[in-house]
Amino acid sequence: MLIKSLIAVFLAAILTENYVLSKFLGICPFLGVSKKLNTAVGMSVAVTFVMVLATAVTFPIYMYILVPSGMEYLQTVLFILIIAGLVQLVEIVLKKYIPALYKSLGIYLPLITTNCAVLGVTMLVLQKVGPDYTYIHALVNAFGAGIGFLVAMVMFAGVRGRLENADIPKSLKGLPITLVAASLTSLSFLGFAGFVEKLIPLS
Amino acid sequence: MAKRGYLKELTKGVVKENPVLCLVLGTCPTLAVTTSASNAIGMGIAATAVLICSNAVISALRKFIPDKVRIPAYITIIAGFVTVVQMLVKAFAPAINDSLGIFLPLIVVNCIILGRAEMFAGKNPVIPSILDGIGMGIGFTAALLLMGIIRELFGSGTVFGVQLLPVQILIFILPPGGFFVFGMLIMLANKLNTRAGKAVKTTPCAGCPLAESCSKRACSEDGKEAAENAD
């Protein structure tokens, strides 16, 4: 039952509740860094990593420190500071101990502090907390959100590669046509609505 | 003379440097909350309040904040004001709080606010910074309202809840409609700008507060090579 619900949470985070294409979180990197496949993958892996790490830290802090002491209103300030600190820490650790990984992911790390998908996922998982939704679900949800980001970025990098050489009206060039392409990509994700509930009926 | 300068700071954000349509900042809330005109107004006012307060405080503290830690310092100041606005909205307008949901606390990572802190408030005195905040806030609200009206009109056939169209094209209030309407509006802004003989910004990174560190790295075409050379 636990495994089943975890799979449901994971698939929902990737497909039906895709953070970029249906929740509009993390649009800036989605539009800015999706020009090339390798940068798109690098950014997404870094985002996934920080998302899981941030959720792992913020979830217990909120549940066991802020809620018992009645200071939920500090959530916004505390979370953004934790994320900023974590990103800095990860950058330092990677640079020192795993320079190879730092070389491929490090350049994206400073951009992640202001990525609303990371702050968004740490806050959204707290809204779902209940008897059927525990710490493990939150972590799986964060991981799924990151993978969903990766899927959207990779798909979109492919679409944009095709757009590069297309002959389009001058005022559509650049951002407008990118947004129209994003619209069509997100249209394809609408097809997944209700998919997870049908596939893995919970109850 | 000074008066005219102040007026310029106030009006530039509304049309010439509209944060959403010309600088392309704050795309996430622009797309997410514009499913109805009233949501758009609520978001616009909340963000404007934060923008004015944070601009004022950051510009007052600009000589005390060391350059190296300015971004974390700005984020902390902004987060403080976002919390204040969040509590006020929860107390006085719970309906707006429910419909904006997660995007109310997410004002903290809205690039318009950090962007104005970095581009303007961190370098200018308090009064111009406040005027800049008001102007940019009005520009943000106006662009949001425009998108909200278009999407609500076609998506639910209403504007501010008043029935205007007999048909409902549901896709306009779904995510794809958001991307599409935003793309069309930027195309219009580009067209008007080129007609007026101004350069067209094509990268969404151009207005981002971190663009300077980013364009050398991740956002540029040859980001990989640049990063390798930098080490």
Image (cartoon, coloured by chain):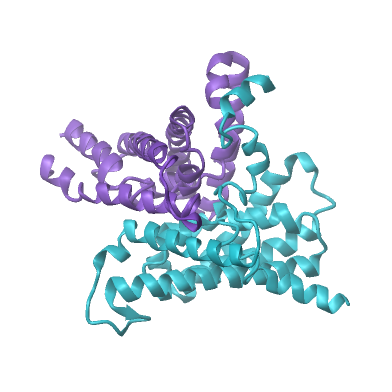
Q: Quadrant of the N terminus of chain B?
A: bottom right
Residue at point 22% right, 77% down? B167
x and y percentages locating residue A3 in the rendered image? 19, 31
Q: Residue at x 43, y 44 (%)?
A: A122
Residue shown at 34% from the left, 35% from the top: A151
**Residue B26 relative to residue B99: left or right:** right
Q: Residue at x 32, y 47 (%)?
A: A185
Q: State the image quarter where residue B223 is shown.
A: top right
* Image quadrant in which the C terminus of chain B is located: top right
Quarter occupied by residue B58: bottom right
Q: Which chain is cyan?
A: B
Residue B227: image quadrant is top right
Q: Position of residue B20 (x, y in %)?
A: 55, 62
B1, above or below B198, in the image? below
Q: Position of residue B62 (x, y in %)?
A: 80, 54
Of the pair B168 and B199, the residue shown nearer to us: B199
Would residue A133 be visible to someone looking at this image? Answer: no
Residue B155 pos. (x, y %): 29, 70
What is the letter of the purple chain? A
Q: Is residue B79 above or below residue B11?
A: above
Query: Does residue A60 appear anywhere in the picture?
Result: yes
